[in-house]
Image: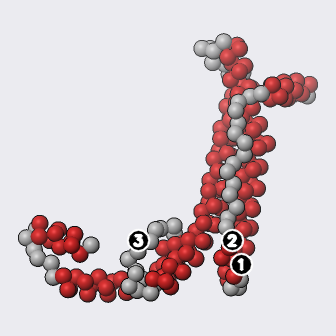
Amino acid sequence: MAERRGNACLEHGYVMDRSTYEEGRSAGLGQYCTTDTAYALGESGQSYNGVCSAHSEQDFLASYNKGRDLYAFTSAVSSADSELSSARSRHDYLDSELDKYEDGYRDEDLTMEEHNNLVLELWAERRYLEEEAIPYWMYAHRFLEEQLDEYQNKVAYGDPSADTMEPRAFTGPEAHDGPTSADARAMLQEVLGSLQQ
C-alpha cells in the first residue's frame, strides 16, 4: 500500500514522507478497526480486507462475523420477498393478458390452433403461479421472517445457540415446463363452467 502510494507521488514529482504516512494510516485504522465498525460492515454484507491485523483483529472479526450472521438472515428474507413480488407481478400481467383474450381479442397473424395454444400457455402459467410459486414464496418469506425474529431474540438474550443458526435455504418450487394435458382439461372445465353461469 505505502509503496504504491509512494510511486503515485513520484509520478507527480513529489516524494512521500513514509513515516508520516504510516503514522496517519495507523491512526486512521485505530479509529476504523472497532467492533462497531466491524459489526456494521458485516451487517451490510461488505467484505473485510484484513487491514486490522495490528488493531485487535480477533475482536474485530468476532463482531464482523456476528454482523455477517445477521446479514445472512436479512438477505434471505429480502430474497424471498423479491421472489414473491416477482411471482405476483407476473401473475397480474397474465391476468390482464387473459382478460384481453376473454374479451374476444385475437391476433390475426396467428392460426386458430396457435391462438388456442397461446391462451393455454398463459392460462397454465397463471395456474402454476397461483398453485405453486406464490404459495411457495409466501411460506418461505413467512418462515424466514420468523427465523430472523428467533435469531435476533436469541442474540438479544445471549443465547449461545444463535451462533449455530443459519437461514433455511429455499431454492424455489419445481419449475414450470409449460402446459400439460391436465392444464388443458382444467382450462376447458373452467370455460365450460363460465358458460353455464
Residue count near mark 2 (Cα–Cα under 10 Å), binned few <14, some 14–19, many ≥20:
some
Point 62% across, 53% down: residue: 82
Under mark 2, the amino acid is Met
Residue picked out by circle 3: 49
From the viewer's perspective, is 188 left or right of 175? right
Mark 1 and mark 3 lie on one chain; the one further toward the N terminus is 3
Label 3: few (<14), some or many (≥20) within 10 Å?
Answer: few
Q: Quadrant of residue 33?
A: bottom left
Is 19 displayed left or right of 174 in the figure?
Answer: left
Judging by the rendered image, the residue that carries numbered circle 2 is: 165
Q: Amino acid at mark 3?
A: Asn
**Relative to residue 142, is residue 149 depicted above or below?**
below
**Residue 42, image x, y percentages:** 52, 72
Q: CA distance from mark 1 to mark 3?
A: 28 Å
Instruction: Point out the residue furthest to the left here.
Output: 13
Horizontally, residue 136 falls left or right of residue 69, namely: right
Q: Dot 1: what SS?
A: helix
Residue located beneath label 1 in the image: 161
The quadrant in which residue 9 appears is bottom left
